[in-house]
Amino acid sequence: CVKKNGVLILVAQCKEGAGSKRFWDDMGIYYSSEEVKHDLLKNFFIGRHKTYYLLKAKEKLRMLLVSEFDEATTHRFAFEKSENPQKALDTAFEMLGRDAKVLVSPWGSTTLAKKI
């Protein structure tokens, strides 16, 4: 539900890392959703769709991550690092203006948003 050119802020501890080895590897070799789509259509792998959707989101909006990840890991997964939630919000408001709408989803990984 994030508008094009909007900002997505993900606050996640990530203490167990970023997911599977395949996801880690894929995020290091693909730079666009079209590249992933091309390969998926030739040879589908379970899990590669996450790479596709993450890169697709990156192409439409800016994504900020507040986590324990270092700068290099954060960039590998198509995010920009923010030190804390407040700094991430400040960055988003600087980009979009103080009147920008904000949606907070405390259980984002298990929530399916619906535009009304």
Image: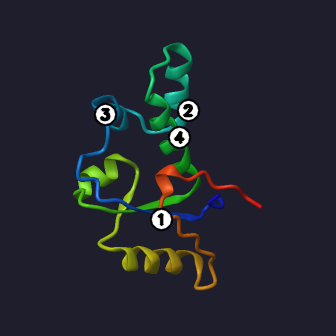
Q: Amino acid at mark 4?
A: Tyr
Q: Amino acid at mark 2?
A: Glu
What residue did someone put label 1 on?
A: 106
Q: Nearer the viewer, residue 9 or 74?
A: 9
The alpha-carbon separation of the residues under discs 1 and 2 comes to 31 Å
Check disc 3 and report its element: helix, strand or loop: loop
Check disc 4 and report its element: helix, strand or loop: helix
**Which residue is drawn at the image coordinates 25% and 58% (left, top)?**
71
What residue did someone put label 3 on?
A: 20
What residue did someone put label 2 on?
A: 34
Whole-percent x and y of residue 96?
58, 76
In the picture shown, does residue 63 fall above or below 24?
below
Q: Amino acid at mark 1?
A: Pro
Tag in front: 1 or 2: 1
Are the residues flagged by discs 2 and 3 in contact, CB closer than 8 Å?
no
The alpha-carbon separation of the residues under discs 4 and 2 comes to 10 Å
In the picture shown, does residue 37 fall above or below 75?
above
